[in-house]
Structure formats: C-alpha cells, structure tokens
Image (cartoon, grey):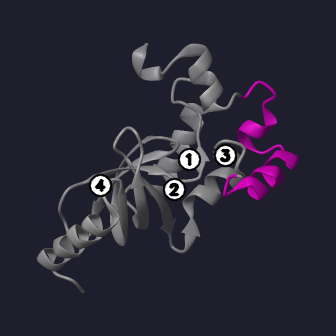
Amino acid sequence: MLNLTTLHLRRLLVLSWCGWGCVAWAWPGVVTHVSDGDTVWVQPLQGGEVYKLRLQGIDAPEICQPWGPQARAALHALLQGQVVEVQGRYRDTYGRLLAQLSRQGIDVGAWMVGQGYAWSYSYQHRAGMYDALQVMAQSQHLGLFADAQAMQPRWFRKRFGSCHTR
C-alpha cells in the first residue's frame, strides 16, 4: 500500500509525463455524491481531494430532461457510499476527470447503458464503447429506450440549452 506522499509523487510524475490534460492512474475511492446520471464525486481511500468525475463512454439525460431524474436515481442507488475503482485519463472541458468506474468488478458505464439509463457516447461518427449494449437495451425496450420521445442530451442541449442556465 502506498503512503500519501508516494501517491502524490506518482501522480505528479504521471501528470508531467502525460501533460496537463492527461491523468493516467487507477485508484480506489468512495462515491460521496451523484450529481446526475453520468457525473459523480469520489474521495480516494487514501484521503486527499474529492474528484468530480464524468463517466467515460456514456451520455445520460440532463437532470432537467425526461429520464434525467431516473438516471440519477439509478446511479445513486448503485454507487452512493460505495467503494469504486477509478481509471481516469483525461479531463473534459469542464475540468471533470473522464473515468471508467467499476464496482465489485462491474463496469458502471456498461451497466447504465445496458439498463437503459444512458446512451453509449459516440463522437464524430466513431462508435461508442457501449454501442452493442445500447442495441441490446433498445431491442428489449429498457428504460429510456422504451420512450419514443427520449432525446439524446446533446440534442436536448442544442434545442433547450443547459439545465444550469435556466
């Protein structure tokens, strides 16, 4: 087990090697808050600052749009107060660490898409990492995929703006 000083030194070395936008380490932590269906706050088990994380590979409904509260509630029920393994690499434009989370060996992003609480995130016509799970959830009409009016968050924001500017 690393002590806190060694852990910080390792992080600084990784940051200097990767550059400012890259954070390439894995660490266990406890989920202290769930903001919405794809954003959580995690406290490292060794202590230190709490990190605001964006789940990599998914796009959950905005909290103010249909299915947003359900996505947040599902993620909260799964993770609040639980120990997770965080694997992060980059920060998004809002400063959040983009990370894959796992709880007891289960990929949280895969679970969210597979249960119909989020879309697999694709960018510039590149396949998303959970596209196959999304197709399965759609074929089974799970969660938001049972709602013909469900709108991907990127289109919701373009049409109605951010929930935070209302």
User: Type of residue at label 1?
Assistant: Ala
Q: Can residue 148 be found in the magenta stretch?
A: yes
User: Type of residue at label 4?
Assistant: Trp
Ranked by sequence position, the earlier of labels 3 and 2 is 2
Whole-number angstrom distance, CA of label 3 to CA of label 1: 22 Å
Q: Counting other residues with Cα less than 10 Å from the Cα at mark 4, is it few (<14), some (14-19), or many (20 or more)?
A: few
Residue position marked by numbered label 2 in the rendering: 78
User: Type of residue at label 2?
Assistant: Leu
Residue position marked by numbered label 1 in the rendering: 74
Q: Position of residue 14 (x, y in %)?
A: 29, 70
The residue positioned 52% from the left and 49% from the top of the image is: 75
Q: Are marks 1 and 2 in contact (CB under 8 Å)?
A: yes
The answer to which quarter of the image holds residue 153 is top right
Range of magenta residues: 128-150
Ranked by sequence position, the earlier of labels 2 and 4 is 4
The answer to which quarter of the image holds residue 24 is bottom left
Nearest to the eye among marks 3 and 1: give it. 3
The residue positioned 57% from the left and 65% from the top of the image is: 107
Q: Which mark is residue 122?
A: 3
Q: Counting other residues with Cα less than 10 Å from the Cα at mark 2, is it few (<14), some (14-19), or many (20 or more)?
A: some
The residue positioned 80% from the left and 36% from the top of the image is: 146
Q: Position of residue 99 (x, y in %)?
A: 45, 58
Residue in the foreground of this view, choosing between 98 and 31: 98
User: Regarding mark 3 in the picture, which secondary structure is present there?
Assistant: loop
Q: Is residue 59 visible?
A: yes
Whole-number angstrom distance, CA of label 2 to CA of label 4: 31 Å
User: Regarding mark 2 in the picture, which secondary structure is present there?
Assistant: helix
User: Regarding mark 4 in the picture, which secondary structure is present there?
Assistant: loop
Ranked by sequence position, the earlier of labels 1 and 4 is 4
Nearest to the eye among marks 3 and 4: give it. 4
Whole-number angstrom distance, CA of label 3 to CA of label 4: 24 Å
Residue position marked by numbered label 4 in the rendering: 20
